[in-house]
């Protein structure tokens, strides 16, 4: 078990203890929610893990880095940004996917852009967003998020 | 109550869909691995390593999500943000967006309620964007898979950009409203 995993578990455990002291009944309710969401997300987690195995195990690194690596340049960044905007997968499982891309030769910029557009922009949920918030606000938010995602990615590529 | 039943129904449907996709993925993977036996070891080892990394933190992440969802009720968030003003509203929006859990579409009705309460637009945008990409349990997963440096850099850049975007969109919408009022 690595340090990060230990830290995360200790952090969650600490929060749990704090919650029990504060309100026993609510904590029990929270644990029921936790158990339900665990089983709810498990199939998606398994799907993405198998997908990562296939991706890393069978596609050569040079292929992946040609599409989303350093030498792919701005066009590669644009492709992952669009991919992230259109894909509709839970953000929880986007991180292992991003890590696998990074391991297989994708650049920091494209991975950061991918995570940011994936979480911030939802083309699939855009109709709902327009219905709830109006056309102007929804389109502005998604459009500006797209530009911001690319800026964040470029800065991360420079500093990391 | 009706909403609750509907939610349960869609959840069951989603669960079923995920199980079917998982089964299809498994079948395709087994087929592929038997056609290309030389790839078997690499694929299985990679998947297994990622599975271990994930299963070590997934229960903890789910506990955090459960705690936040029960201890930070949606109504309170809406009540709190509806009254916020100034630059503080933007950062309060980010904080309140980072705490509760759930997919982005859960946040849209909350944002719409805030809009009706005439909360600040910068606050609503900050809230929505933070909800989308700076959830605390979610950041734990980022920490595990991408490391502290990557997570810290992306988190701080995201907070700054979300604040700027909130203010920018507020100005744009106010400017647009003024223009239509004049003509």
Image: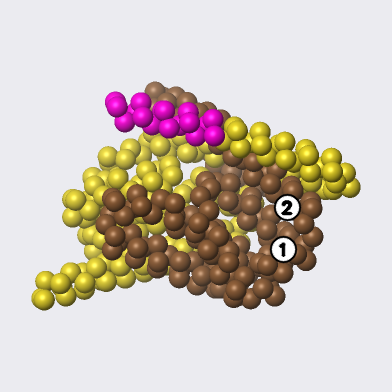
- The foreground one among A21 and A26 is A26
Q: Colour of chain B?
A: yellow
The image's mark for residue A55 is: 2
Is B2 within the magenta? yes
Q: Judge whether residue B155 can be spotted in this image.
A: no
Q: Front-most of B127 and A61?
A: A61
Q: Mark 1, chain letter?
A: A
Residue at x-position 38% and y-position 54%: A126
In x, y percent, where is residue A135? 29, 60
Up the image or down, A64 lies above or below A130; here it is below
Q: Nearer the viewer, residue B123 or B32?
A: B32
Q: Which residues are magenta?
A: B1-17
What secondary structure predominates along the stretch shown in magenta?
helix
| Location of residue B53 (image quadrant) | top right
Q: Colour of chain A?
A: brown
Q: CA distance from mark 2 to mark 1?
A: 9 Å
Q: Residue at x 58, y 66 (%)?
A: A79
x and y percentages locating residue A58 in the rendered image: 79, 53
Relative height, residue B164 to residue B60 (above, below): below
Residue marked by disc 1: A64
Say which of A101 and B180 sits in front.
B180
Residue at the left extreme of this rendering = B182
């Amino acid at each position: 078990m690595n340090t990060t995993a230990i830290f995360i578990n200790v952090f969650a455990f600490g929060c749990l203890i704090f919650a029990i002291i504060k309100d026993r009944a609510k904590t029990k309710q929270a644990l029921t929610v936790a158990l339900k969401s665990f089983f709810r997300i498990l199939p998606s987690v398994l799907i993405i893990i198998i997908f990562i195995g296939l991706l890393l195990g069978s596609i050569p690194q040079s292929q992946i880095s040609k599409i989303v690596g350093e030498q792919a340049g701005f066009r590669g960044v644009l492709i992952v940004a669009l991919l992230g905007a259109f894909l509709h997968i839970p953000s929880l499982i986007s991180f292992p996917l991003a890590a696998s891309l990074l391991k297989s030769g994708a650049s920091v910029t494209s991975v950061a852009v991918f995570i940011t557009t994936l979480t911030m922009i939802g083309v699939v949920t855009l109709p709902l967003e327009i219905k709830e918030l109006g056309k102007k606000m929804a389109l502005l938010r998604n459009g500006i998020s797209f530009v911001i995602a690319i800026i964040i990615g470029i800065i991360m590529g420079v500093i990391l | 109550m009706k909403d609750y039943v509907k939610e349960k129904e869609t959840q069951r449907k989603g669960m079923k869909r995920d199980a079917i996709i998982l089964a299809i993925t498994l079948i395709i993977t087994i087929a592929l691995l038997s056609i290309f036996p030389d790839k078997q070891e690499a694929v299985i080892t990679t998947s297994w390593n990622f599975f271990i990394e994930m299963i070590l933190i997934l229960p903890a992440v789910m506990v955090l999500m459960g705690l936040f969802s029960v201890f930070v009720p949606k109504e309170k968030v809406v009540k709190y943000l509806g009254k916020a003003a100034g630059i503080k509203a933007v950062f309060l929006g980010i904080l309140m967006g980072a705490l509760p859990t759930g997919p982005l579409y859960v946040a849209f009705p909350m944002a719409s309620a805030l809009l009706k309460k005439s909360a600040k637009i910068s606050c609503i945008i900050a809230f929505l964007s933070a909800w989308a990409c700076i959830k605390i349990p979610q950041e734990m997963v980022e920490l595990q898979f991408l490391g502290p440096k990557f997570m810290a850099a992306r988190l701080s850049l995201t907070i700054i950009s979300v604040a700027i975007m909130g203010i920018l969109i507020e100005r744009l919408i106010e400017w647009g409203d003024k223009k239509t009022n004049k003509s």
